[in-house]
Image: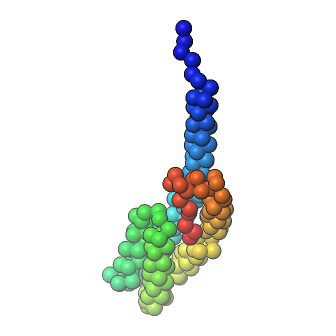
Amino acid sequence: MKPKLSLGLSILICLILVVFGVVYGTVSGYADERAHVTDLLSGDNGIAAILGYRAADALNLCVVAERHIPGDATVVALRNAAEGLRGAKPTISALQEGDGALAAAFTATAAALKASPSFAQSARDAQYLGMLTADFDQYGSGHVIYQTYNKAVAAFDQKLSTPVLGDLARLFGVAPCQPY
């Protein structure tokens, strides 16, 4: 003969299972949505990849600059900023700081390069500098990925601020995203 559970105990077990399902589903759903947003930061063709393109352009400028102004402090600063950005952790603050340093070093190196007499005589390098500058600027703050990321962050943060389900997700560790 099988032992029978009381009706009250059966209802209590059902309620516990329902509550667990709601909590687990809510938290994993919000965590998945947050992962989609953070993929725009560190995933393929995300902000970190775009900044990697900027760093590559800066390193190409270093090659040109070494031909005309070898050992110049601006070139060393540019190379350090580019390598630092490529090796940075994909956090908002690290990427913003690295991009700011890279942009300042790129501008300083381009100005020092333009002041070089040997650079003024090289039409090929002048054209290449123009191309690198245009490419560097294209991947700057006006690029569409920054706006896409910020819109996704705003939508996720708004969803996370909804009563009950959003509160439940925050209670179990789902954090809001930081805009760029």
Q: Residue at x 37, y 74 (%)?
A: 80
Q: Residue at x 43, y 63 (%)?
A: 89
Query: Is residue 128 or residue 16 the one in the foreground?
Result: 16
Quadrant where the image shows the N terminus: top right
Q: Residue furthest top?
A: 1
- Residue 10 position, x and y percent, is 60, 27
Q: Position of residue 146 (x, y in %)?
A: 61, 68
Q: Considering the image in quadrants, where does the C terminus appear?
A: bottom right
Tally of numbered discs: 0
Measuring from the top left, give residue 86's x and y in whole percent.
43, 65
- Residue shown at 58% from the left, 53% from the top: 168
Where residue 41 appears, as percent x and y from the top left, is: 54, 61
Compared to residue 67, the image places residue 89 above or below, namely: above
Which residue is at the front of the view, 90 or 169? Answer: 169
Against 155, residue 64 (above or below) is: below
Residue 30 is at least partly visible in this image: yes
Residue at image x 44%, y 78%? 101
Left or right position of 96 against 34: left
Quadrant position of residue 151: bottom right
In the drawing, does residue 139 fall left or right of residue 93? right
Task: Say if 98 sits above or below 89 in the image.
Answer: below
Residue 159, visible in the rendered structure: no
- Quadrant location of residue 147? bottom right
